[in-house]
C-alpha cells in the first residue's frame, strides 16, 4: 500500500534504498519545521544536506533515527519503517525496546560530540557494544582499539574526553558510533563546533569512511567536503528540499535562485 | 607584545614594587573580635552554672554513650533508606509515565510538607490507627460480602503493630521517609543537571532508559548529588534528636536531658548535648570532604577541572598537588 503511494510520488521502493523519506512533516508547537521532505539515499551513497540555519536540516536528520517523532509521512531505513509497524494498513507505535534496536543499527555523530565525560575514550567506544549488544569485554576492547586506530587515536584510549581536543573528541565519537557496526551513519554538523585548524582531521576520517562504502547522511556547511565526497547534495530551506542532485549540478549550476543566493554567501 | 624577554631589543622592565593599600578597618575588627572572644572564654570559666566537672563526669557515662550509638544508628539507616528511596522517587518523577510521576509528586508533597517532629509523633502513634498489620487479599471482607460469605478472611500473615512499630522502628521510618522526599529533589536536580546531549547520544546508540540512567546519567549526576547529600546527613544527625518524641528513650538528647532533669543540672547537660553533636558533625564534615574528593576523581569532567587547576597554578610556577 505504502509502496504504491511511494510510486505516485516518483520515489523508489523502500527496499531499494538505505534511507527513504516520504513526505515528512514535523512541527514544534505552531512552528512548522519540516513541510514535506522527500529523500532517497541508496545503499553505500553519501548525501550531504546543505542550507541555512533553521531550515530544518538537523530536525530532518533526527527524524531518521526517531530522536524526533514525525507528524506525517514515512521514514524507512534499510527497508524498515522507522518508529512504527504497519499491521493491516494501520500504524502501531513501536515499543521503546524495538526503537532502541532500530537506533542501534544507525550511527549518529553530533555537533557537540556528546561523548560520555565520565568514561575514557576506550570505554566510550566499548559501552554500547558491551551493554546493548552483550559483546564480551575482551572482544569489545579489541574492536575499540581497532576503531581508535582507524580514527588515528590509538594512543588516546585511556584519556578522558575533557583532556582531548575538539577534533579528537569528534573522532572518538565517530569510533563510538562505528562500534555498533551501523548500516547507516548520520552526521549532524560534525565540524561546526571545531576550531578551523581541527576541521580537516575529522573530515579526513569521514572521507575515509565514505570510501569504505558506508552509507552516510551528512548535514554540513563544508561545501568542499560535499563537492569532493557526496554522491548527492541536497539543499534545504524553509522545511522543504529546494533542490537536489549530484554536487556538480547543485553546487556549480544551481537551478533555483534560493540555492544560488545561499551558495554565493558561503563560497 | 612580548614583555618577557629582550626579544626585539627591548629590556624587561623592573618588577613593580608598589606600596600596598592599607586596611585599617581590618585591624579594628580584629581588636573587637579578640576582646569579645576573651570575654566569652572568661565567662565559660568563671560562671559556676556551667559545672564543667559535672559535664566531664556524665558526658561519657554508659547511658549517654548508648544514646550516642542509637543516634549514629538512626542517622546511618535513615540516610541509607532515604537515599535509595530518593533515587527511586526521582526516577519515577522524571518518568514519561504520568501515573508514576504523579505518585512521586504526591509522596514528596506529603513528606516534605509535614514537619519531621510531627511525623515522629505520628509514626509513634500509628498503633492507635492499626493495632495489627496484616498481609493478604485487599478488601477481602467486602469481596466476601459480594459473594455472600460473611467475614471472609484471606490473610497470609500479620503482626501486632506494637511489636513492629517499636520506638526505634517508628522513629527510623519517620526520619527515612521524610529524608526520601528531600533526597528525591536532590537526585532530580542531579539528573536534570546532566546535559540533554548525553541522553540523545545514549539513545542513538540503542540504549534503553534503565541502562542509560544507570550507566550514563546517574554517574554524572553524582557530582551534583553528593555535596547536598553530605549536608543532608549532617542535618539528619541533628534531627535524630526528634525521635525523643516518638518516644525513643535510649537516644542521645533524651538521655542527656534525663540526667539533667534528675539532677537539676539542666544547663550543663544541654552544653554536653551541644558538644556531642558538634563532635559528631565535625567527623561527618571530614568524611564529606573525602567522599566529594573521591567522586570528583572518578569523573572525566572533574578530572579536567583538576587539570585546569594544575595548569593555572602551574603558570605561576607552583603545582597544586
Image (cartoon, rainbow, N blue to C red):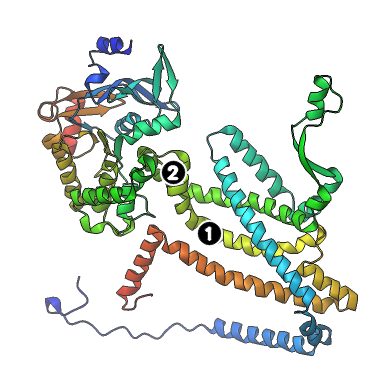
Characterize the local packing of mark 2: few (<14), some (14-19) or many (20 or more) Cα atoms within 10 angstroms. some
Q: Is residue B50 above or below residue B284?
A: below
Residue B283 picture location, percent across and down: 61, 73
Residue B271, image quadrant: bottom right
- Residue situated furthest front in the rendering: B156
Of the 4 image quadrants, the one containing the C terminus of chain A is top left
- Front residue of B319/B158: it is B158
* Host chain of mark 2: B
Residue A124 in the image: above or below residue A233: below
State the quadrant of the N terminus of chain A.
Answer: top left
Q: Label 2: which residue?
A: B212
- Work out whether residue B184 can be spotted: no
Q: Report whether A255 appears left or right of A144.
A: left
Residue in the picture at 49% in, 55% down: B222
Disc 2 to disc 1: CB gap under 8 Å? no
Where does the image place residue A19, in percent across and percent down from the top left? 26, 26
Disc 2 from disc 1: Cα separation: 20 Å
Residue B27: x and y in percent read 56, 85
Q: Is residue A143 above or below residue A18?
A: below
Q: Residue A201: x, y in percent?
A: 17, 49
Quarter where residue B313 is shown: bottom left
Q: Helix, strand or loop at disc 2?
A: helix
Instruction: Tell me the number on the disc at residue B47.
Output: none
Residue linked to disc 1: B226
- Residue name at image x 78 percent, y 86 percent: B52
Horizontal arrangement in the rendering, residue A37 relative to residue B271 (left or right)? left
User: Which of pointers 2 and 1 lies earlier in the amino acid sequence?
Assistant: 2
Amino acid at each position: 500500500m505504502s509502496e504504491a503511494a511511494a510510486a505516485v510520488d516518483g520515489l523508489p521502493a523502500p527496499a531499494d534504498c538505505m534511507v527513504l523519506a516520504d513526505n515528512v512533516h514535523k512541527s514544534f508547537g505552531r512552528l512548522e519545521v519540516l513541510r514535506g521532505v522527500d529523500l532517497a539515499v541508496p545503499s553505500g551513497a553519501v548525501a550531504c544536506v546543505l542550507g541555512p540555519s533553521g531550515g530544518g536540516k538537523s530536525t530532518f536528520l533526527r527524524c531518521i533515527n526517531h530522536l524526533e517523532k514525525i507528524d506525517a509521512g514515512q521514514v524507512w531505513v534499510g527497508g524498515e519503517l522507522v518508529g512504527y509497524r504497519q499491521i493491516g494498513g494501520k500504524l502501531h507505535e513501536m515499543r521503546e525496546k524495538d526503537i532502541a534496536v532500530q537506533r542501534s543499527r544507525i550511527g549518529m555523530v553530533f555537533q557537540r560530540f556528546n561523548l560520555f565525560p565520565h568514561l575514557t575514550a576506550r570505554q566510550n567506544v566499548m559501552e554500547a557494544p558491551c551493554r546493548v549488544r552483550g559483546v564480551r569485554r575482551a572482544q569489545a576492547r579489541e574492536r575499540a582499539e581497532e576503531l581508535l586506530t582507524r580514527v588515528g587515536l590509538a594512543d588516546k584510549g585511556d584519556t578522558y574526553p575533557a583532556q582531548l581536543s575538539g577534533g579528537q573528541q569528534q573522532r572518538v565519537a565517530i569510533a563510538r558510533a562505528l562500534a555498533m557496526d551501523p548500516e547507516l551513519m548520520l552526521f549532524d554538523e560534525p565540524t561546526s563546533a571545531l576550531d578551523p585548524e581541527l576541521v580537516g582531521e575529522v573530515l579526513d576520517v569521514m572521507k575515509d569512511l565514505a570510501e569504505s562504502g558506508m552509507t552516510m547522511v551528512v548535514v554540513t556547511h563544508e561545501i568542499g567536503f560535499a563537492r569532493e565526497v557526496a554522491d548527492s547534495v541536497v539543499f534545504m530551506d524553509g522545511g522543504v528540499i529546494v533542490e537536489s542532485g549530484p554536487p556538480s549540478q547543485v553546487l556549480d549550476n544551481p537551478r533555483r535562485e534560493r540555492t544560488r543566493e545561499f551558495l554565493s554567501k558561503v563560497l | 607584545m612580548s614583555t618577557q624577554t629582550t626579544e626585539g631589543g627591548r629590556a624587561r622592565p623592573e618588577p613593580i614594587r608598589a606600596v600596598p593599600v592599607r586596611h585599617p578597618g581590618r585591624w579594628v575588627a580584629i581588636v573587637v573580635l579578640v576582646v569579645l572572644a576573651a570575654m566569652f572564654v572568661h565567662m565559660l570559666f568563671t560562671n559556676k552554672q556551667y559545672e564543667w566537672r559535672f559535664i566531664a563526669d556524665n558526658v561519657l557515662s554508659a547511658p549517654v554513650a548508648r544514646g550516642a550509638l542509637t543516634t549514629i544508628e538512626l542517622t546511618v539507616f535513615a540516610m541509607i533508606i532515604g537515599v535509595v528511596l530518593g533515587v527511586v522517587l526521582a526516577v519515577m518523577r522524571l518518568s514519561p509515565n504520568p501515573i508514576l510521576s504523579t505518585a512521586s509528586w504526591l509522596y514528596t508533597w506529603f513528606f516534605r510538607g509535614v514537619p519531621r517532629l510531627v511525623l515522629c509523633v505520628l509514626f509513634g502513634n500509628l498503633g492507635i490507627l492499626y493495632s495489627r498489620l496484616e498481609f493478604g487479599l485487599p478488601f477481602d471482607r467486602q469481596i466476601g460480602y459480594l459473594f455472600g460469605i460473611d467475614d471472609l478472611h484471606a490473610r497470609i500473615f500479620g503482626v501486632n503493630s506494637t511489636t513492629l512499630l517499636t520506638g526505634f522502628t517508628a522513629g527510623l521510618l519517620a526520619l527515612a521517609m521524610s529524608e526520601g522526599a528531600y533526597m528525591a529533589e536532590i537526585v532530580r536536580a542531579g539528573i536534570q543537571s546532566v546535559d540533554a546531549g548525553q541522553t540523545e547520544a545514549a539513545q542513538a546508540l540503542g540504549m534503553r532508559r534503565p541502562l542509560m540512567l544507570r550507566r550514563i546519567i546517574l554517574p554524572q549526576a553524582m557530582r551534583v548529588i553528593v555535596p547536598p547529600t553530605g549536608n543532608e546527613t549532617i542535618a539528619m544527625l541533628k534531627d535524630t534528636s526528634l525521635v525523643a518524641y516518638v518516644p525513643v528513650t535510649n537516644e542521645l538528647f533524651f538521655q542527656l536531658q534525663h540526667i539533667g532533669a534528675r539532677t537539676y543540672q539542666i544547663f550543663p547537660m544541654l552544653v554536653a548535648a551541644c558538644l556531642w553533636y558538634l563532635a559528631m558533625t565535625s567527623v561527618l564534615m571530614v568524611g564529606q570532604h573525602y567522599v566529594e574528593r573521591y567522586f570528583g576523581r572518578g569523573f572525566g569532567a572533574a578530572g579536567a577541572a583538576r587539570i585546569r587547576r594544575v595548569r593555572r597554578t602551574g603558570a605561576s610556577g607552583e603545582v597544586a598537588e
